[in-house]
């Protein structure tokens, strides 16, 4: 019984010390000081409905674009792979299109500035069908601070 109390005491002391250190660090972190001031990167997801929108991101954030195609009898309206107007502000890390006409891309906010992400939706006809000569642009402006 005595042996159990001795082995438990150092752990209790260590846990108490950790609690005191965490409590002391909390006020400094709350005011943007100390080692805990680093902000976690965010993931911003954009879809068809975000066309024309402006968003703000921080350096290190990921911006994911997911564009969904549109299908009607004999026609598929397919998206191009989204691109960035300025790779020093927004660098594309992944991107591509799917056979069904969907497109996606992920961009990393690299540095301060403004960039636009763009894509175009075009018609692809099935055999025996004709597409209207129409291109639908998609654009989002991203400001990285």
Image: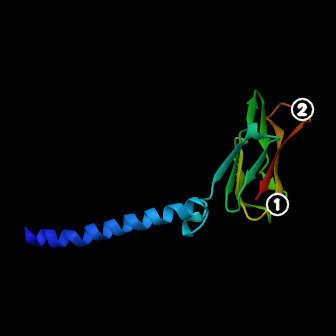
Q: Position of residue 143 (x, y in %)?
A: 79, 54
Left or right, residue 76 beside residue 62: right
Q: Position of residue 105 (x, y in %)?
A: 71, 53
Q: Is residue 74 above or below residue 110?
A: above
Residue lying at 71% horizontally and 45% vertically, measured from the top left: 46
Could you give the CA–CA distance between mark 1 and mark 2, rounded to whole angstroms? 37 Å
Q: Residue 70: which quarter of the image?
A: top right
Q: Secondary structure at mark 1?
A: strand
Q: State which tag comes first along the sequence, 1 or 2.
A: 1
Q: Foreground residue, 128 or 78?
A: 78
Q: Position of residue 107 (x, y in %)?
A: 72, 57
Q: Position of residue 109 (x, y in %)?
A: 72, 60
**Marking on residue 132:** 2
Residue lying at 87% horizontally and 32% vertically, measured from the top left: 130
Q: Residue 84: which quarter of the image?
A: bottom right
Q: Foreground residue, 91 or 133?
A: 91
**Marking on residue 113:** 1
Quarter of the N terminus within the rendering: bottom left
Q: Is residue 143 above or below residue 9?
A: above
For the view shown, which residue lies furthest in the top direction? 73
Q: Secondary structure at mark 2?
A: loop
Q: Foreground residue, 117 or 101?
A: 117
CB-based contact (under 8 Å), mark 1 and mark 2: no
């Amino acid at each position: 019984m005595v042996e159990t109390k001795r082995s438990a005491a150092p752990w209790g002391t260590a846990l108490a010390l950790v609690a005191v250190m965490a409590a002391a660090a909390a006020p400094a972190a709350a005011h943007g000081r100390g080692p805990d001031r680093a902000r976690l990167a965010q993931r911003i997801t954009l879809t068809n409905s975000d066309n024309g929108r402006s968003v703000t991101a921080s350096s290190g954030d990921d911006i994911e674009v997911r564009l969904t195609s549109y299908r009607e009898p004999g026609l598929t309206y397919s998206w191009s792979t989204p691109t960035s107007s300025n790779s020093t502000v927004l660098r594309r890390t992944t991107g591509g299109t799917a056979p069904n006409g969907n497109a996606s891309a992920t961009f990393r906010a690299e540095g301060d500035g403004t960039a636009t992400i763009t894509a175009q939706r075009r018609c692809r006809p099935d055999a025996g069908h004709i597409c209207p000569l129409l291109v639908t642009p998609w654009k989002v402006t991203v400001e990285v601070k």
